[in-house]
Amino acid sequence: MDILTNQVGVSPKNILTTIDEALLLRAKPPSRLLAPPREKKYRVGVCVHQWMWEKVANHVDLQSEFERKISLVCRRLIQRDDVEIALISTHQGIERALHSDEEVVTRIYYQIPEILRRGVHCVEGFVHPEEYAYFMGHCDLVISSRLHGAILSLIGGAPTIALGYEPKTLGLLKRIGLEDWHLSMWDFEIEELLTKGTALLENSYQAQKMLNRGILEGRNIALLNREAVRCAAIGKDLPRNYSPKEKAFEY
């Protein structure tokens, strides 16, 4: 908004602020088995990624510290004895991709003590976004440093703590009333993350109500974006009072 208005000179009245259209995807069952059947009361999905830590000289050290903290979070959760972990990422199994996060998953897995690893499942290979949403949506909690890992988990139906690496993560969660489910990837504290995660696990009914309300709001904003693009493509103005409303959202 600042760039468009102050540097480009676009009038604010000609700017429509919408939201990521990934919120309009629908979850569907995976075409292959991504992890063994659940053995514990809770399954926690953890979506981790390789971040560039831009404009920071010690980016390698920061990535290593991030992975160390995530491995400690996984260890603490497994030690509860009622939790199992599914480690996954949204950048996986694609040849000639800009980058892959599968090595991050592997490094975190091997930082977890061997005696605890039987409670950790690493999802390998490409997973279609709709299938990812279904798989992660059936977790009781998701911790995601990937924005789209968080979005897909939310539309699948799982309360999700998003570790933001850029302002877009918190910006999206604010739009749908879930900003309390955000922590900074840069400086989150292990205990704070565990406290938030435990609260979501133990108050699942309230968390689900907040999630349903937030996703419905997000989908309506995304539908507004879709209509605006359609109108622009056919050379018509978006109706001034256009306000799409979904009656319900089904996972």
Image (cartoon, rainbow, N blue to C red):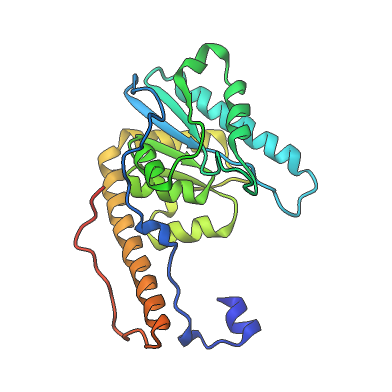
Give the percent coordinates (x, y) of residue 135. Answer: 37, 37
Q: Residue at x 57, y 43 (%)?
A: 94
Q: Residue at x 59, y 41 (%)?
A: 49
Whether residue 199 is visible, yes or no, is no
Above/below status of 228 relative to 96: below
State left or right for residue 180 relative to residue 206.
right
Whether residue 165 is visible, yes or no, is yes
State left or right for residue 247 relative to residue 128.
left
- Of all residues shown, which one is farthest toward the front? 95
Give the percent coordinates (x, y) of residue 232. Answer: 42, 82
Give the percent coordinates (x, y) of residue 201. Answer: 35, 34
**Considering the image in quadrants, where does the N terminus appear?**
bottom right
What is the quadrant of residue 101 in the picture? top right
Front residue of this view, candidates 91 and 75: 91
What is the quadrant of residue 145 in the picture? top right
Front residue of this view, candidates 246 and 176: 246
Above/below status of 192 relative to 209: above
- Of all residues shown, which one is farthest toward the right? 57
Q: Residue at x 34, y 20 (%)?
A: 40
Front residue of this view, candidates 42 and 88: 88
- Of all residues shown, which one is farthest toward the left? 247
Above/below status of 108 relative to 23: above
Q: Residue at x 37, y 66 (%)?
A: 222
Give the percent coordinates (x, y) of residue 148. Answer: 48, 51
- Report the number of discs: 0
